[in-house]
Image (tube, rainbow, N blue to C red):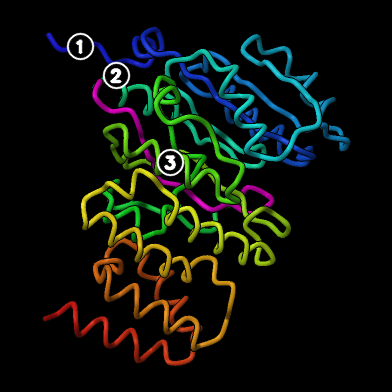
Amino acid sequence: MGKDLSASAVDAELRLSIVVPSYNQADFIAATLDSIFSQSVEPYEVIVVDGGSSDGTIDILRDYERFSALRWLSETDEGPADAVNKGLRLATGDLVGIQSSDDIYFKDAFSQVVRTFSSKPDVGFVLGDVAGIDSNGNIDYTRRFKGVGWSELFAVSMCIPQSSIFFKRSLIGKVGYWNPAYYGCDLDFWMRLLFHTQAIHLPAVLSGWRRYPGQRTSPEKYRRIWDDYWRMISESKELASAPSDVRRWARASRHLLVLRFSPDPTFKFHFRHLVQAFLLHPQFVRYNPRRALVKQLMLVPGGRALLLSIKKWLKR
């Protein structure tokens, strides 16, 4: 008889810790917590690390103390990396998910994740799909990934959804914590984790990533995101000793960031980086959402001609 992988069975085997960094998110944090505590597999612990909010967040957290799994603290911190690292140090579960206080999990996300880890003991990292949601929680789009190989992940510049990622806590001892030196400290952490464990893509939409003005990935932050990503790739010790293909894809990923966080809207800038990306990693077009890719390229003067060139090349 096969192993029982019902929700109750997997819950008993693997304990799930959810770390929630928060700062002045009173408009959204209740929805985040509701999405956590309404799961069919209950979290072992939910650790909210608040940066000293002054908008009513603390009152909401006190109200949610009715859930015994909730632990929270509120104090001034040095930003998201500091908050996440505090939560990771407090976590005691077997598995960890890091959820922003403005995003949500979808129904049965935890049961699918824990079931996956239980059935694949060699896997230490699970990436699920994600939906983009607006301020009211309405779904704008769904993003489905093609896999978790280096080719696929560098094709999207490691821009994978924090809200749909889960990993074994034991890996923290191997890779350390979030590095506050990088604005995209989450991308750096995922990359380091992936060098130390087997990863798997879970083809299910696990979470909703909320998009609204003023968040950390808003256009005014693009230059810092861009500069820090280039530096992150250049400074990675793991990449320095990686196979040549992986290093090449990583170099391409710096140029491919132009599709998501371009600090310069001009044709010359886009064209130069896309051509260099294409020379280093021409398969990137297979791993990016086709509609989003076309939309981005069509916004660039000369983008239509570039798309036709790529299409002809792929048919060779």
Q: Secondary structure at mark 3?
A: helix
Q: Which residue is mark 3?
A: 190
Classify 47 as above or below 134: above
**Numbered disc in front, either 2 or 3:** 3
Quarter residue 252 falls in: bottom left
Q: Position of residue 151 (x, y in %)?
A: 26, 56
Return the residue nearer the eye: 261 or 208: 261
Q: Position of residue 71 (x, y in %)?
A: 68, 15
The magenta stretch is 120-137
Q: Main secondary structure of the magenta part?
A: strand
- Residue at 72% across, 12% down: 66
- Residue at 54% across, 58% down: 140
The three-letter code of the residue at mark 3 reads: Trp
**Numbered disc in front, either 1 or 2:** 2
- Taking the magenta stretch, the answer to whether it contains residue 134 is yes
Q: From the image, which quarter does the N terminus lie in?
A: top left
Q: Which residue is mark 1?
A: 3
**How crowded is the residue under tag 2: few (<14 C-alpha within 10 Å), some, or many (20+)?**
some
Quarter residue 83 falls in: top right
Q: Secondary structure at mark 2?
A: helix
- Residue at 60% across, 17% down: 90
- Residue at 25% across, 20% down: 121
Q: Which residue is mark 2?
A: 118
Return the residue nearer the eye: 62 or 79: 79
